[in-house]
Amino acid sequence: MSPKTVSKVNFLAESETSLEDDDEWEDDIRDTTAEEIPPAKTEASELLSRISRGPAAMPKKAPTSTARFGSQKKCRTLEEIRRQRRRRQAATTPEYFDGPIWFGGMLKGISFAFRYTLDAVWHQTVRFFRRPLSFLAILWVLAFLFGKTSKALQVVVQPLCFILGIPHSSLCVSRPHHTRVPKHADFPALVEIQSATFEQLLDDFVHVSLLSLNVKKAEMAVSELNEIIHRVKYQNDEHFTASLSNFIGTAKETAIELQILSFHVQDTVDRIVVANNHSISTIDGAHRKDVQYSLHSLIPWSSPSSDEMILKIFSESIDMLSQISEILILKAQVQWKNLEDLQGSLIVVRDIIVRDNLEVPADCPNELVWELVHHHGLTVLNYVDEYLQPAPRHVSSALHMLHEMSGNIAALRERVAEPPPSGSSIPPEVHMNSIKRGLETLEASNREARERERDARRLLV
């Protein structure tokens, strides 16, 4: 066979091989799982026999206008085959990681866990707490309705308060007339009442505290007179000594309680100072919060928290001042009664001494002794009267100031219980400045009163 013929045979063999390869690629497209079939071993001999028979024995192929693997269809087919091979490799190789597949599986797992949690926890919890939550909701509605209708219910239930068990209810509790809720705050007026009243009270009770020492001196003088009466055989000594003992006991009790009352007034002033400091800090904090969160004031149906806080502090302050005035009035009235009893005992003792001096017999062997006792007793009683004379005046002045303060508080309470005129609300800064000025006045008055009392005690002792 000539070399030319051999080269022709090789060319035809390569062409046949390429055609068979194309057929294999098409088979892979139709069935990606099929295995590749190797070419038969007798293909070369068959080709040689075809060549020897001539060109007529060769298979004719359809004419094509494109080069081998040059068409777009072939390229797409090859890419599809490569992708299928990569999928098979990912399915058979455990180390292969596909991001989209893993992310989709993770989303499915999260969705399943969320649905399970919602069904097993939320639905079961709601089903379990359905009755308790319904019961609590009913209680809340009843409490809300009761709070709205408590005043009307109190009027209805009031005639039935004599029935056993009902008087212990809160509907039967009688409230005093001054429990009207303030509609607006007026700290300048309240501070003016405090300053004017307690400045005068501190001055009066400095004298009352010093007068307690005078009452103590009167007690000691009468005790000495009682001892003299016991040592001499004085006529009608039983009645006389009983009157002296009554005076001594009343004087001792009055001296102690006057001192306690003076300390109570000073303690009351200290309490008012502490309450005013607390009011200033609370109002200042509420005002700063309103300035910081100023958008809250744009809501028309909600009052600013600073106004509510000022109104609450004002209501507490006026209630505290009213209670203080009532307590001080009661204590001052008790001391007024003690001083009146002391004056009455002193008058009884003086009358006994004067009467016994007129009834001394002329032939009495102890006439001189009795005259000395009478003279000494009258002298002692005159000194005691001088000691006791200023005390009722200062206690009466204190009582007058306390009653005046109580009346001013009642008038202020009635005034602030009415709705304020439009556009007349007092700014928080004005409230704080008024409280500060009143606080400074009270502290200065209390300090001066303590210094005067200390100096006076030093001189008396």
Image (cartoon, rainbow, N blue to C red):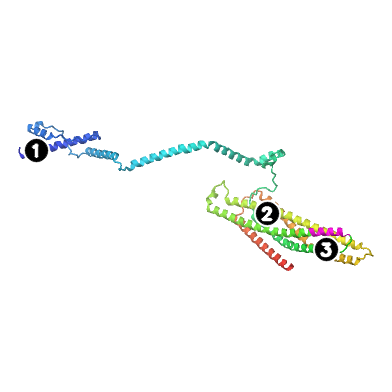
Q: Residue 368's mark? A: none
Q: Mark 2: which amino acid? A: Leu
Question: Which residue is identified by label 1?
Answer: 8
Picture coordinates of residue 303, whole percent (x, y): 58, 48
Picture coordinates of residue 336, whole percent (x, y): 77, 57
Q: How far apart are marks 1 and 3 (CA)?
A: 167 Å
Q: Which residue is drawn at 7% across and 38% down?
A: 6
Q: Residue 227's mark? A: 3
Q: Residues within 10 Å of mark 3 (few under 14, many from 20)?
A: few
Q: Which residue lies furthest to the left in this view?
A: 2
Q: Label 2's element?
A: helix
Q: Nearer the viewer, mark 1 or mark 3?
A: 3
The N terminus appears in which quarter of the rendering?
top left
Is 444 part of what is drawn in magenta? Answer: no
Q: Mark 1: which amino acid? A: Lys
Rendering quarter of residue 154? top right
Secondary structure mostly seen in magenta is helix
Q: Give the range drawn in magenta.
A: 236-249
Q: Label 1's element?
A: helix
The C terminus appears in which quarter of the rendering?
bottom right
- Viewer-side residue, 418 vs 389: 389
Q: Can residue 459 be seen in this view?
A: yes
Q: Residue 321's mark? A: 2
Whether residue 400 is situated above or below residue 121 in the rendered picture:
below
Please report whichever mark, 1 or 3, sits nearer to the chain's N-terminal start: 1
How many numbered circles does the render carry?
3
- Viewer-side residue, 199 vs 101: 101
